[in-house]
Amino acid sequence: MRSLILNQIAEALSNQPGLDGTLHGKRRIKQGKHGSRASLFYSAKNQAFIPVESRFELSFCYELEANKRVHKYRTQALEIPYRHSSLYPDFLIVDTEGTPSVREVKAFAHIDSAVNMQKAEYLTATFGRVEIDFDVVTERDFWSGQEKINRIMVYNRGGRLSPSSQLITFIAELVSAMDIKNRIVHRVRDEIQHHNLPHYLLEAAICDGVLQCDMRLPISAQTRLEVVL
């Protein structure tokens, strides 16, 4: 089992996107089926589309993109023999030090079912034998309310576009040079455009973390920004 798992991890991480720009796993998630929640998430960290099959998996992708400890990830990347069938854990995650972990995403209301608990116990034991951390996450582990709205918005507007680190640093230095009272969204955006740079760099800098604001409140033109260098 050890070699099976480690070989699958190496294969998943070496896989390249197909012609459709998607990184498919061992189990292919079908898109476009009537009534399905399956969708494609564009991942800046993976530079490809990641297939997901629930709104909770989609939310988890945003969380992974914001987590600076996460280097890359794949969905449905591993096939684990189980009884007379197989299990396909939702996420294979690799941190910035190259350490893999595995996560299953479930609705909180369903985690205590006998079937799901049996599967989770089996996967915990199986991955534990190869010293890989496994856990089940639910919507209660994710952002909620206004913070979720804000983080999804800034990722979609700028974070997913992956500007260079030099540009992000330039934006941070640009805002640092501004008077503190002018460090609000609409003035920073005007300053960025004054330098003939695309406005989405503001959201990209927030995603990167060099610009911060109170994510508990709606982001508006008057939202105050802080620089973190």
Image (cartoon, rainbow, N blue to C red):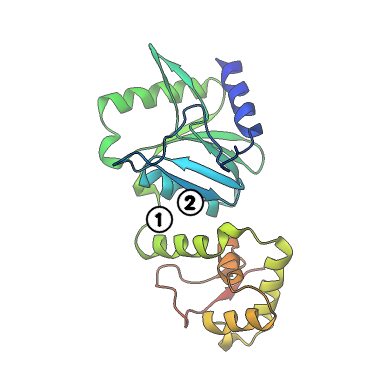
Name the residue that disc number 2 marks: 63
Q: Residue at x 27, y 36 (%)?
A: 110
Quarter that holds the N terminus: top right
Quarter that holds the C terminus: bottom right
Q: SS class of the residue under badge 1?
A: loop
Q: Is residue 64 visible?
A: no
Q: SS class of the residue under badge 2?
A: helix
Q: Residue at x 54, y 51 (%)?
A: 65
**Which x, y percent locates residue 152?**
45, 60
Name the residue that disc number 1 marks: 143
Three-letter amino acid code of the residue under disc 2: Glu
Image mark for residue 157: none
* Mark toward the start of the polypeptide (2 vs 1): 2
153 or 3: nearer the eye? 153
Q: Is residue 49 visible?
A: yes
Q: Are marks 2 and 1 in contact (CB under 8 Å)?
A: yes
Residue 219 vertical placement versus 11 (above, below): below
Counting every numbered tag in the picture gives 2
Q: Residue at x 53, y 54 (%)?
A: 66
**Which x, y percent locates residue 185?**
53, 79
Local crowd size for mark 2, using a 10 Å CA cut-off: few (<14), some (14–19), many (≥20): some
Three-letter amino acid code of the residue under disc 1: Trp
**Which x, y percent locates residue 19?**
60, 39
Image quadrant assignment for residue 180? bottom right
Residue 23 vertical placement versus 59 (above, below): above
Image quadrant assignment for residue 181? bottom right
CA gap, disc 2 to disc 1? Answer: 8 Å
